[in-house]
Image (cartoon, rainbow, N blue to C red):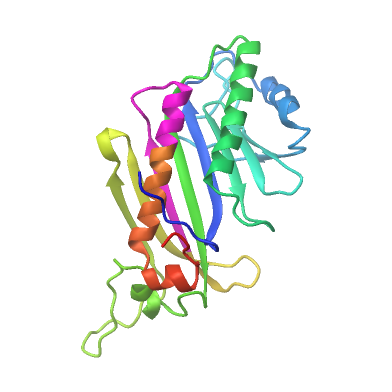
Amino acid sequence: MKTLPSYKKPPVDEVVCGIRFKVPDKLRITHFGLLWDKFKKEYPNVQHAIPIATNIAQVIEDKSTGMPLPRVWFINKSDDQVIQFQIDRLYFNWRHRNDAYPRYLSVIDNFSKTYEEVDKFFTEMNFGNIEPIESELSYINIIEKGKGWNSLDDLPHLFTDFGWALKKTRFLPNPKNISWKTAFELPENQGRLTIKLDQVLHKETKEPLLRLELAACGSSDSFSKDGMLKWFDLAHRWIVEGFSDITSKEIQKNIWERDDV
């Protein structure tokens, strides 16, 4: 297999690696605290978040009482690693704070260790093993103004498939904002790669930013851990090759310092 594209200064801001799994019947709110006991030495901070629903009709609740159940975040001291858990999902996040992106192998290794710890916890609680349904891998890139673009006029030079062009003969001016989305099937019916481009604002400076997300979702033929990790490797290859495919070679070389060619 050929070497994947590599960059010294990739615009990666966050990587999310995780699974959706079959809900354990015996899981209760008290188990969330017991699970945190397994991680709190390295992840001492906890936050609640709105649960992720698979569809609009899904309600994340305790089956026996009807009480809503949260999504919890276990966060490390440096705030750049997050374990997300809810009754049917488990994610590991790396997010950019001070250190550079540690690369995919570090992210997948952390997810694998987290998965093993949660699977062990499920066994201890008599839930049975984790039963994965679907896997997800997402790369969120933030491209700052001045790094390959200054206005939306520049997007065709940054993204090879972005076709907007301002012409003197057209009625519409340059768009004020941009939102673009497309999807591709992964090989052998193993899922889908979705690519989304949006213009957003920096939380503090309010400067415009480009948010480029490449997200793979699907599953392998095997729901074993080895099969799951093999799927993540496939998803990672499609995300990295996809990023290289939709962005210009000039920007890759001059801004993100591509170093595999």
**Is the C terminus in the top left, top right, bottom left or bottom right quadrant?**
bottom left
Outermost residue, top side? 126
Q: Residue at x 41, y 26 (%)?
A: 227
Write the residue at 58% across / 38% down: 92
Q: Position of residue 126 (x, y in %)?
A: 61, 9
In the image as oriented, which residue stretches furthest toward the bottom? 168
Total numbered circles: 0
* 212 horizontally vs 77: left or right: left
Quadrant in the picture for residue 116: top right
Q: Looking at the image, can residue 69 be seen?
A: no
* Side of 185 relative to 16 (left or right): left
Where 205 falls versus 95 (above or below)?
A: below
Q: Is residue 95 above or below residue 177?
A: above
Q: Front-most of 15 and 105?
A: 105
User: In the image, is residue 87 above or below residue 50?
Assistant: above
Residue at position x 47%, y 30% in the image: 20
Question: Where 139 falls versus 150 (above or below)?
Answer: above
Residue 91, horizontal then vertical, whole percent? 56, 36
Nearest the eye: 131 or 239: 239
Question: Looking at this view, is 94 or 227 the one in front?
Answer: 227
Instruction: Give the magenta range.
Output: 211-232
Q: Is residue 155 magenta?
A: no
Image coords of residue 109 (percent x, y): 58, 36
Does residue 131 show up?
A: yes
Does the magenta portion include 222?
yes
User: Picture coordinates of residue 214 (x, y %)?
Assistant: 42, 51
Q: Residue 16 vs residue 29: left or right?
A: left
Task: Name the side, left or right, on which 67 lies relative to 221.
Answer: right
Q: Quadrant of the N terminus?
A: top left
Picture quarter containing residue 247? Answer: bottom left
- Kindly give the residue lying farthest to the left in the view shown: 169
